[in-house]
Amino acid sequence: MPEISRFFGIVIAIFFDDHNPPHFHVKYGSYSASIRIEDFAVMEGYLPPKALGLVMEWADIHMEWADIHKDELLKDWELAKAKEPLFQIEPLK
């Protein structure tokens, strides 16, 4: 699993040769979900509310200057499609 960030037991990954729309995968214990990069909507799976909230905070979607990691995620998505090494994205602290 091409891990791009890890924090508080949450693992964020983008898979090579994955299907559109651009999205990332989240694993938290026995839970997993796919989250669309465009609007950070859960496409598939389930995360407990607290874990999902941490992922949304990491993605900065609740901030007025939102989407800091959105550009980084889209760049990693493009790298994955080209089968290039992915960049690590700073974890939530």
Image: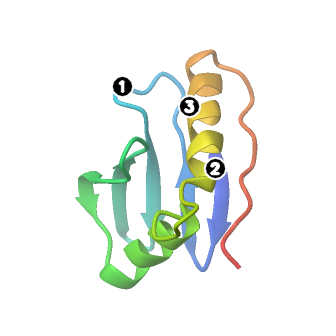
Q: Position of residue 60 (x, y in %)?
A: 54, 65
What's the residue type where badge 2 is placed?
Glu
Q: Is residue 87 visible?
A: yes
Vertical relation: 86 (above or below) 40 = above
Determine which residue is flagged by label 2: 3
Residue pictured at 52% horizontal, 72% vertical: 57
Q: In this view, does 81 lie to the left or right of 87?
A: left
**What residue is shown at x 46% (from left), y 62% (from top)?**
27
User: What secondary structure is found at the residue carrying circle 3?
Assistant: helix
From this viewpoint, which residue is outermost toward the front?
Answer: 64
- Is disc 2 placed on a helix, strand or loop? strand
Give the amino acid type for the residue marked by disc 1 in the picture. His
- Whichever of callouts 3 and 2 sits on the residue coming sooner in the sequence is 2
Horizontal relation, residue 62 to residue 44: left or right: right
Provide the residue designation for mark 1: 19
Q: Nearer the viewer, residue 56 or 65?
A: 65
Q: Which amino acid does label 3 sit on?
A: Trp
Occupied quadrant, residue 16: top right
Q: Mark 3 highlights which residue?
A: 77
Neighbor class of circle 2 (other Cα within 10 Å; few <14, some 14-19, many 20+) is: some
Q: Position of residue 38 (x, y in %)?
A: 39, 41
Which residue is at the front of the view, 52 or 29? 52
Q: Are marks 1 and 3 in contact (CB under 8 Å)?
A: no
Horizontal and vertical percent position of residue 42:
28, 55
Q: Distance between the residues labelled 1 and 3?
A: 10 Å
Q: Residue at x 52, y 67 (%)?
A: 64
- Chain-order first, disc 1 or disc 3: 1
Q: Within 10 Å of the Cα at label 3, are there few (<14), some (14-19), or many (20+) other Cα atoms?
A: many
Residue farthest to the top, as pictured: 82
Q: Where is 19 relative to 50, above or below? A: above
Count of numbered circles in the view:
3
